[in-house]
Image (cartoon, rainbow, N blue to C red):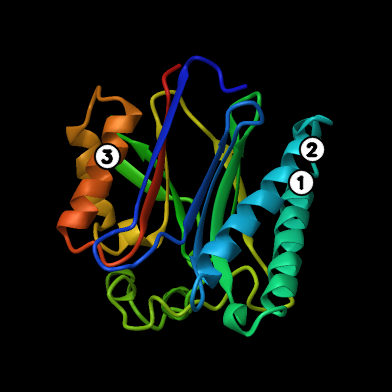
Amino acid sequence: MLPNNIDVSFHTHVGKVRANNEDSIYINRESKILMIADGMGGHNGGEIASKLAVEIVSKYLTSQIENNILKKIEIDRYLLRALNLANSKIRIEGSKKPSLYNMGTTLVLCVISETNNLHIANIGDSRLYIIDIQKEKISKMTIDHTLAENQYRDGKISKVYADKHPLRHILVQALGINEQINPYLTKCKWQQGEYLLLCSDGLTDMINENEILDIFKNSYKKKCNEICTTLVEIANNNGGRDNITVIVSLRNA
């Protein structure tokens, strides 16, 4: 169970353009899992894909966590297994109806260990940040699986241009799109006083990283639910061109 020194909250909004919200969110205080999926696909395919992803990944991970897998070195293997299960299920469901063809979803998640290590996985362009107000630092802990990000990592374009690139929304990986996936996996220590921010691209398309950091700095001593509300409100004020979903968590001690 998340200890009392960890505050966590979330907020999701359809935005100002979309007809429905295709983002899905999952918080499990017992198993210490935080997760966001951002669906895509015609009709209601994106919504179905994102819900399937969080359902399958959470079910698999919670069953393994009950067997204390976080005490084992192979945590990455379990995260990868969970994402592969979701990928297969989404592809199977997408093949059953023409209206669901090629549906898919991004996903970002973290599992918090007993020693406050973060085990992080993502596929697509939903992100996880660690934010340290005291050091005035925001660190992106995930990788965007987009054409623009690939060009940036290959040294063909700058980081600034990658954030504005016309190909920044073209995903090269997502759950349900291809038979094989290669999600990004990493782990780090979660230090006292640091915030976690998990978000769909509906937030980061409307607010850049420096602006996100400023929002956290200006929200000093506010509760996580207030920060969530502020982030979503500002993203909507800046255009709200997509669904916006955020999870904010603070380790107080």
The Cα atoms of the two marked residues, 1 and 3, are separated by: 31 Å
Is residue 58 visible from the viewing direction of this image?
Answer: yes
- Kindly identify which residue carries mark 2: 63
Q: Do the residues labelled 1 and 3 touch (CB within 8 Å)?
A: no
Q: Are marks 3 and 2 in contact (CB under 8 Å)?
A: no
Mark closest to the chain's N terminus, 1 or 3: 1
Mark 1: secondary structure: helix
Whether residue 122 sits left or right of residue 135 in the image: it is: right
User: In which image quadrant can residue 66 be found?
Assistant: top right
- The residue under the point 38% across, 76% down is 168
Neighbour class for label 1 at 10 Å: few (<14), some, many (≥20)? some
Q: Is residue 148 above or below residue 251?
A: below
Mark 3: secondary structure: helix
Mark 2: secondary structure: helix
Whether residue 135 sits left or right of residue 176 in the image: it is: left
Q: Which of 46 and 122 is in front in this view?
A: 46
Q: In x, y percent, where is residue 15?
A: 28, 59
- The residue under the point 31% across, 42% down is 137
Extreme right residue here? 67
The Cα atoms of the two marked residues, 3 and 2, are separated by: 32 Å
User: In which image quadrant can residue 197 be found?
Assistant: top left
Hey, what amino acid is under mark 2?
A: Ser
Which of the numbered marks, if any, corresponds to residue 60? Answer: 1
The Cα atoms of the two marked residues, 1 and 2, are separated by: 5 Å
Which of the numbered marks, if any, corresponds to residue 229? Answer: 3
- The residue under the point 73% across, 37% down is 62
Whether residue 200 sits left or right of residue 115 in the image: it is: left
User: In which image quadrant can residue 164 be found?
Assistant: bottom left
Hey, what amino acid is under mark 1?
A: Tyr
Q: In x, y percent, where is residue 84?
A: 75, 62
Q: In x, y percent, where is residue 119?
A: 63, 42
